[in-house]
Image (tube, grey):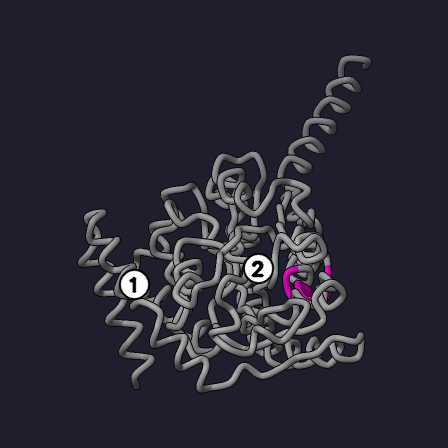
Amino acid sequence: MFNRISSIVLAAAFAAGAASADNVTLRWGHYLGDSPFVQPEKDFASSVTERTEGRVNIEITFAGGLGGGGEVMTLAGRGAIDMASVVPGYYTDQLLFWRAYQIPFVFDSPRQAMDISAAAFKDIPYFRDELSKFGLKFLFHQPLGSYYMTGKDDSCLTVEGLSGKKIRSFGADIPKAHEAVGAVPVSVGVGDVYEALQRGSLDYSFLNRGNILSNRLYEPGPVSCGPVMSISGHLVVINEEVWNSISTEDQAIMLEEAAIAGKNYMDNIEKAEEAAGEAIIKAGGQILEFPAAELAKWKATAPDLLGDWVANMDERGMGDQAKEVQAYWLNIINN
């Protein structure tokens, strides 16, 4: 009798263990702080957990708690964390194709950048394949509001006024745009911009209105000039091995929710950015429109950054692929 009961107990314990092994908690490393600006990502996490009835539980750690912006992609690819929000411009020597979405003066608006991103991901394999090389699967792409320069005064209203100014920069291409007008690009993480403006190690930040608001940059830098540039934002990715360990049913749920999150981001980006601008003004900041004539002057001064990207890719033996991407993008932009 004892052996029979023991066998039943052990079998039950094994079954319970097997059931719990089917459940997974995904650790998501995010470089940004928690704010309304990333609400679609938080909604994605909670919706996946709810719809899978806890079989897939997603926990986001914000503000670099699981790794900084320049670390989370590598950590996710190696399996040290399961998911990550990845800024392509922080990985310019690895994400050779994705980094092109953060080249200045290519896209006219955040919506155009995201429309092209969605179309190109569907039609051109290089973006999917590039992430796979690092053991990552793409889930969705974050749109990003247009960029503003935020500092202590309105010298940011002219190209000449930017000469010699220290401007927050990142990636391989944005510094070239800043250098074209005589500015000094300085690499500063989003979470460190406030203090850099306070101390004077930056004259101007370079971020969208949502990030200006969520990081309260209007306090050390009351004047914001823009918009001057539209690019796409970060990628939300998951470790491929972890993805493959999830049931087909739950994968389908995650992909559905990823599509919803991407759509919600895009549908709300203009409204959210306008609301952020209003909140900045209400808090005492100023938002000044960067004159169209000055922007035209800036673009005329800057090199052909998309062409430079193609040339760089050619040196790496991927010129034909880069030309294909360039032609695809320009066909959409010009039509």
**Badge 2, how many Cα within 10 Å: few under 14, some, many 20+?**
some
Distance in Å between CA atoms under marks 1 and 2: 25 Å
- In this view, the residue in front, 174 or 238, is 174
In this rendering, the count of numbered labels is 2
- In this view, the residue in front, 27 or 54, is 27
Vertical placement of 270 versus 210: above or below? below
Name the dominant secondary structure of the magenta segment.
helix
Residue located 59% across and 76% down the image: 225
Instruction: Give the labeled residue for mark 1.
Output: 124
Look at the image and give the residue range highlighted in magenta.
Answer: 35-41
Residue 308 can be seen in this image: yes
The question of residue 301 being in magenta is answered with: no
Vertical placement of 94 versus 184: above or below? above
Residue located 19% across and 56% down the image: 319
Instruction: Give the labeled residue for mark 2.
Output: 253
Residue 252 can be seen in this image: no
Residue kind at label 1, given as amino acid type: Ile
* Residue 235 image position (x, y, % from top left): 50, 57
Which quadrant of the figure contains the C terminus?
bottom left
**Badge 1, how many Cα within 10 Å: few under 14, some, many 20+?**
some
Vertical placement of 318 versus 306: above or below? above
Q: Secondary structure at mark 2?
A: helix
- In this view, the residue in front, 251 or 160, is 160
**In this rendering, which labeled residue sits more in front, label 1 or label 2?**
1
Residue kind at label 2, given as amino acid type: Ile
